[in-house]
């Protein structure tokens, strides 16, 4: 098959997950759990193979972008939007990450969802989960492969929908399985925060259409220089409003608040959507819009600052969290800040490189955290059985949080595989040589050092915090003594869960080879798509400094959490050291409370006012009740009922009756019962008739 | 001779008889007398029939008279039976008392 023939396969990356989704949707009711999971994983896996074939054709060919026409979509006047697929080195890289990591997470989810304590053998839920996962893969593929901002937006909204559906997957309970609307609230929060970002994206797209009369990447980028020369503000406006979209989707300040709450979703979802793929869509968007951003340095500065501040801000919050997934969530926000800062500075390759390695090690960390949680749940299950003495096992309704690190400890012995892969993930995230995270983070830091010193220092401090909170987490979870009986009875997970973890661990170790200094594989690869990328120089000062800081941070975490492990019920030792500062981290700077006080409560007030006064009193009580219903009542009662019906129509009917009665009353008098008068009438009649006949 | 008496004389008597019968039916309250008056009217008609039959030399009128007599006989038979029943109920045969069908 020729390489151009291979490119025509590109619609399959969307169609295969859709096919998997449809099979599960239509036939899933008659299929076993395993079959459902296998179909969904196969759909994702086949999409990966197609993406790999596309990548091969690009590698074997010239590497130039190929646009594959798939279908006409909108055709109104001058506006002509087709559903085109864009196959270039950037989109194929994203496709590979999405379907590759996605497939591993699908396989993991087969085991995870079965064991989830909230699952309770509800095969319908199981099927729904995999349908949503496949829908997500399809939507993510539309996002990364679309050839216009409009197609990108379709995928952008599609993944937002999947995110909403999957965060609220256990919509009728909270994360502990207790009846509550907490999870659905978290889903709504994600939806609303993303709507704010999407509003920015839409404004940017409208402006783009107004000035460029085109939304396809090729059309926009080719005119960008010209437009920038005649109207410099336009590109700035577009890029800044795209940044709002990025802040929503990639959880940057000030819209990041939805991502920590998104941990309400099942752990595979946290790994797939809220760590590895969907949240990196913003980074992809900036990298894709590189020709626009490079035209406006102010926008680049803004993006870089937002990324840098977010990276530092979220990293400090992560230090004060106790939930194993919350730590990872803030870590994700922080790492997304690194990527956004990188693409903002124009270090597009570094940003994309970190995106890929982060997808590997953060998916690994989340999935391992899921394995830890499952292990804790198994331990708790045994505990409940034992305490129940077999009479009524499972009757113990103690509310137990399997994700709280204060309940863990010493899991290294119970869950060795999970421990090792988690350790690899944590060291990768901390940026230890020679794991993948070191190379990608270091490239960002080196670029920042050259281009943007302020952001460099922010990122460096964030990297220090990163190493510290990962060290804290590993010491708390895997070392020391179990702080809860459930932790003492925790069990290792099955191979369906651990094998994907091991594969991801290998990727996390080897991921750095994508763009090793001196080889610049990824730089050369992306150079075909993003103009003007240059291989960054490996900076020994930066690398040495960041490694040193990471080691110091890990050492510090050992001093605080490793040397003298946390005992059950003991306060966090950092709290003694930092006091109120730690409380600020622990309470997440009260950002949620601030948003509640400043925006949400005001919004609720306005909503109340609209509901009670405008809708209730004015619209319902006055307009509807008084004006409309009152007028209608008056018309029906007074005009139609009394005047028309009773006084007119009834009068006619009654008058006719009365008339008949009167006539009959007078006629009655003729019927007087006297035979002789009848005879007289007969005689008179005969006389009259005969008289008439004779005399006529 | 009979032939010399003109037709109009017969008809005048017939009319006079009919008028007397009709008046009797209208005025009298005794049903027996009403019956007699009815007979008078029937017979006035009979007289007119035979007078015309003789005058025009056709038998149809003569034959019709026999029918009228038969009907009159039957009518009296039914009527007298009715009067007997009425008397049993009302202990009187005044026709003006029989006004139950008054409207």
Image (spheres, coloured by chain):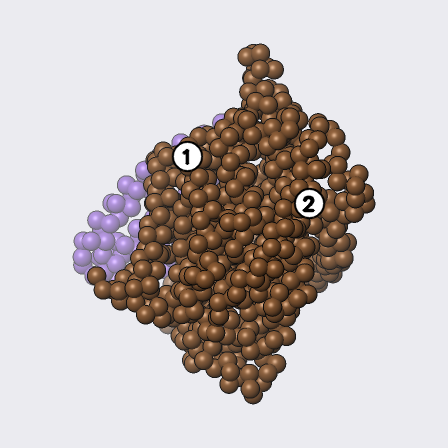
Chain colours: A brown, B purple
Q: Position of residue A612 (x, y in %)?
A: 74, 55
Q: Are marks 1 and 2 on the same chain?
A: yes
Instruction: Choose top left, top right, bottom left or bottom right for residue B4.
Output: bottom left
Determine whether A39 is above or below A566 in the image: below
Residue positioned 46% across, 39% down in the render: A501
User: Looking at the image, is mark 1 or mark 2 nearer the viewer?
Assistant: 2
Residue B92 appears in view: no
Q: Earlier in the sequence, mark 1 or mark 2?
A: 2
Asked if the residue under mark 2 is in contact with the one under mark 1, i.e. CB atoms within 8 Å, the reply is no
Q: Is residue A418 left or right of residue A2?
A: right
Percent from the top left, x then y, of residue A642?
Answer: 67, 59
Q: Quadrant of the N terminus of chain A?
A: bottom left
Residue furthest right as drawn: A580
Residue A585 tag number? none
The chain ID associated with circle 1 is A
| Residue A586 falls in image quadrant | top right
Determine whether B93 is above or below A154 in the image.
above
Residue A200, x across and y down, in percent = 60, 67
How crowded is the residue under tag 2: few (<14 C-alpha within 10 Å), some, or many (20+)? Answer: many
Q: Which mark is residue A319?
A: 2
The chain to which mark 2 is attached is A
Tell me: A498 left or right of A460: left
Q: Nearer the viewer, residue A439 or A148?
A: A439
Question: Disc 1 marks which residue?
Answer: A496
With respect to residue A473, does A659 lie above or below? Answer: below
Q: Which residue is painted at 47% across and 82% down in the image?
A: A223
Q: Nearer the viewer, residue A176 or A656?
A: A176
Looking at the image, which residue is at 44% across and 39% down? A502
Between marks 1 and 2, how big is the CA–CA gap?
A: 32 Å
Instruction: Say whether residue A426 is visible.
Output: yes
How packed mark 1 is, by other alpha carbons closer than 10 Å (few <14, some 14-19, many 20 or more), is some
């Amino acid at each position: 098959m020729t390489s151009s023939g291979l490119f025509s396969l590109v619609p399959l990356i969307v169609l295969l997950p859709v096919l998997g989704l449809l099979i599960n949707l239509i036939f899933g009711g008659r299929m076993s759990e395993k079959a459902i999971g296998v179909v969904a994983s196969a759909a994702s896996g086949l999409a990966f193979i197609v993406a790999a074939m596309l990548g091969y054709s690009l590698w074997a060919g010239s590497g130039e972008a190929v646009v594959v026409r798939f279908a006409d979509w909108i055709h109104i006047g001058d506006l002509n939007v087709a559903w085109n697929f864009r196959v270039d080195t950037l989109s194929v890289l994203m496709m590979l990450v999405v379907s590759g990591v996605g497939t591993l997470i699908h396989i993991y989810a087969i085991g995870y969802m079965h064991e989830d304590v909230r699952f309770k053998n509800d095969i319908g839920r199981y099927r729904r989960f995999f349908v949503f996962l496949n829908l997500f893969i399809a939507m993510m593929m539309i996002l990364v492969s679309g050839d216009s901002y409009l197609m990108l937006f379709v995928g952008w909204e599609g993944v937002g929908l999947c995110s909403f559906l999957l965060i609220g997957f256990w919509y009728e309970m909270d994360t502990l399985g207790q009846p509550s609307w907490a999870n659905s609230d978290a889903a709504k929060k994600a939806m609303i925060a993303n709507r704010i970002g999407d509003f920015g994206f839409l404004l940017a797209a409208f402006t783009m259409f107004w000035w460029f009369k085109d939304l396809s990447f090729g059309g926009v980028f080719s005119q960008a220089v010209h437009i920038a020369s005649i109207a410099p503000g336009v590109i700035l406006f577009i890029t800044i409003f795209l940044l709002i979209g990025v802040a929503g989707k990639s959880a940057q300040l000030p819209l990041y608040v939805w991502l920590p709450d998104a941990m309400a979703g099942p752990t595979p979802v946290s790994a797939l959507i809220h760590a590895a793929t969907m949240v990196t869509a913003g980074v992809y968007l900036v990298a894709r819009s590189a020709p626009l951003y490079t035209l406006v340095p102010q926008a680049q500065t803004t993006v870089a600052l937002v990324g840098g501040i977010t990276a530092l801000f979220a990293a400090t919050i992560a230090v004060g969290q106790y939930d194993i997934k919350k730590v990872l969530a803030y870590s994700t926000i922080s790492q997304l800040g690194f990527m956004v800062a990188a693409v903002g500075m124009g270090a597009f390759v570094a940003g994309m490189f970190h995106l890929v390695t982060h997808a590997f090690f953060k998916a690994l960390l989340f999935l391992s955290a899921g394995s830890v949680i499952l292990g804790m749940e198994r331990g708790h299950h045994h505990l409940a059985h034992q305490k129940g003495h077999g009479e009524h096992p499972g009757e113990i309704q103690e509310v137990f949080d399997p994700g709280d690190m204060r309940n863990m400890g010493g899991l290294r012995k119970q869950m060795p595989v999970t421990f090792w892969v988690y350790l690899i993930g944590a060291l990768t995230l901390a940026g230890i040589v020679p794991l993948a995270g070191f190379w990608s983070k270091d490239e960002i830091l080196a670029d920042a050092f050259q281009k943007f010193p302020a952001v460099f220092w922010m990122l460096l401090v964030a990297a220090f915090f990163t190493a510290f909170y990962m060290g804290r987490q590993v010491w708390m979870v895997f070392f020391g003594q179990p702080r809860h009986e459930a932790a003492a009875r925790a069990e290792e997970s099955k191979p369906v869960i651990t094998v994907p973890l091991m594969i991801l661990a290998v990727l996390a170790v080897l991921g750095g080879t994508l763009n090793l200094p001196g080889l610049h594989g990824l730089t050369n690869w992306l150079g075909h798509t993003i103009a003007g990328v240059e291989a960054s120089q490996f900076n020994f000062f930066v690398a040495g400094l960041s490694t040193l800081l990471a080691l110091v941070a890990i050492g510090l975490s050992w001093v605080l959490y490793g040397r003298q492990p946390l005992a059950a019920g003991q306060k966090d030792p950092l709290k003694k050291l930092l006091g109120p500062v730690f409380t600020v981290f622990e309470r997440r700077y009260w950002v949620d409370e601030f948003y509640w006080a400043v925006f949400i409560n005001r919004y609720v007030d306005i909503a109340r006012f609209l509901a009670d006064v405008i809708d209730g009193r004015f619209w319902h009580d006055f307009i509807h009740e008084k004006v409309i219903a009152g007028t209608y009542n008056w018309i029906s009662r007074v005009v139609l009922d009394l005047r028309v019906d009773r006084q007119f129509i009834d009068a006619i009917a009654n008058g006719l009756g009365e008339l008949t009665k009167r006539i009959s009353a007078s006629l009655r008098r003729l019927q007087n019962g006297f035979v002789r008068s009848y005879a007289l009438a007969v005689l008179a009649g005969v006389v009259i008739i005969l008289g008439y006949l004779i005399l006529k | 001779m009979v032939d010399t008496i003109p037709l109009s004389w017969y008809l005048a008597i017939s009319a006079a008889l009919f008028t007397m019968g009709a008046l009797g039916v209208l005025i009298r309250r005794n049903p027996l007398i009403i019956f007699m008056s009815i007979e008078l009217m029937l017979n006035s008609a009979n007289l007119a029939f035979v007078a015309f039959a003789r005058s025009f030399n056709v038998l149809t009128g003569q034959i019709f008279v026999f029918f009228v007599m038969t009907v009159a006989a039957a009518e009296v038979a039914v009527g007298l039976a009715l009067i007997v029943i009425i008397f049993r109920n009302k202990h009187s045969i005044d026709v003006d008392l029989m006004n139950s069908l008054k409207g």
